Image (tube, coloured by chain):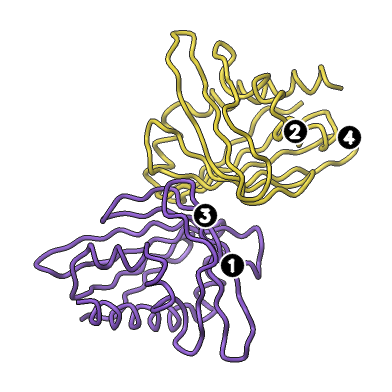
Chain colours: A yellow, B purple
Amino acid sequence: MAKLTIVAEPGKQEIFMTRMFNAPREAVFKAHTDTKAIPEWWGQRNSTTTVDKMEVREGGRWRFVERGADGVEYGFHGVYHAIVVPERIVQTFEFEGVPGHVLLETFTLEERDGVTTLTSQSVYQSVEDRDGMVQSGMEEGANESMDRLEELLGRMG
Amino acid sequence: MAKLTIVAEPGKQEIFMTRMFNAPREAVFKAHTDTKAIPEWWGQRNSTTTVDKMEVREGGRWRFVERGADGVEYGFHGVYHAIVVPERIVQTFEFEGVPGHVLLETFTLEERDGVTTLTSQSVYQSVEDRDGMVQSGMEEGANESMDRLEELLGRMG
């Protein structure tokens, strides 16, 4: 499958990521909304992610904790704003290390001939916030997470 | 007091609004976070706004219903993401007429010599969404709501 495509146009406050999976979109959607699936792919390969909260409905909250190989824990949380099975999720995203910096994320799933294209859009409060995320090595992290998701879909398939 | 300043830079997906009030920022903050204050200023002058839900805390939800002079009701809701008394509110905003289109709003209050400057930033999912809002007559509506807020602060003062 094609690798991750990341588009961060200069001066804009959004990032688009696109990745194709050799799986039906119901499966890709489920991997995003199932409590048991998240720890299998979310975050880095050498870390452990636990689901603290995951209320998959409009207005419901989610919180994941990623524990690195060094034992340090990083919390992430947000609120689901739209859940359209199996095609669309709108949610907020906050890294608890920088409270008050909120992202608005939209995941869109499209399927053609058994191949699902996942597009995620992240909208930031500022171009600076966006650029900071790009420079933090987000690309490598996102790639690894998407590789793990592909592997999970292979096991599910 | 100076009237409302609206900045919507071409090609961006955000709107900044600034307005000064002859009132301490505690009062301006309270007008935004008090259940009884909202119906006094939120929305148009010839409509009636009721607070359906207002959980002023991180992760809490809000929902207001604006009933127009013609009796038609419009629902708005969102989630509070940051509440920093009396200086900052981060929240999401959805108009129930167009579900799934979510705005991320940040209100910042600064006070100098008894005059409070309220800055609101609204971040949209797309430039198109942002431009649609600008073209919908938002400026007139926002001006009226800010005028009503000024009047309320005068009564509170």
Image point 55% across, 77% down: which residue?
A: B66
Q: Find the distance from the CA under tag 3 to the CA under tag 2.
A: 35 Å
What residue does disc 3 label?
Answer: B61
Task: Indicate which label's residue lies in the foreground, 2 or 1.
Answer: 1
Q: Find the distance from the CA under tag 3 to the CA under tag 4.
A: 39 Å
Q: Find the distance from the CA under tag 2 to the CA under tag 1.
A: 32 Å
Q: Which of B10 and A108 is in front in this view?
A: A108
In this picture, residue A122 sits left or right of residue A124: right
**Host chain of mark 3:** B
**Host chain of mark 2:** A
Image point 25% across, 82% down: which residue?
A: B155
| Location of the N terminus of chain A (image quadrant) | top right
In this picture, residue A132 sits left or right of residue B26: right
Amino acid type at mark 4? Gly
What residue does disc 1 label?
Answer: B95
Position in image of residue A57 (x %, y %): 68, 46
Amino acid type at mark 3? Arg
- The answer to which quarter of the image holds residue B88 is bottom left
What residue does disc 2 label?
Answer: A20
**Circle 4 residues within 10 Å: few <14, some 14–19, many ≥20:** few
Residue occupying the far left of the picture: B113
Amino acid type at mark 1? Phe
| Mark 2 in CB contact with mark 1 (< 8 angstroms) | no
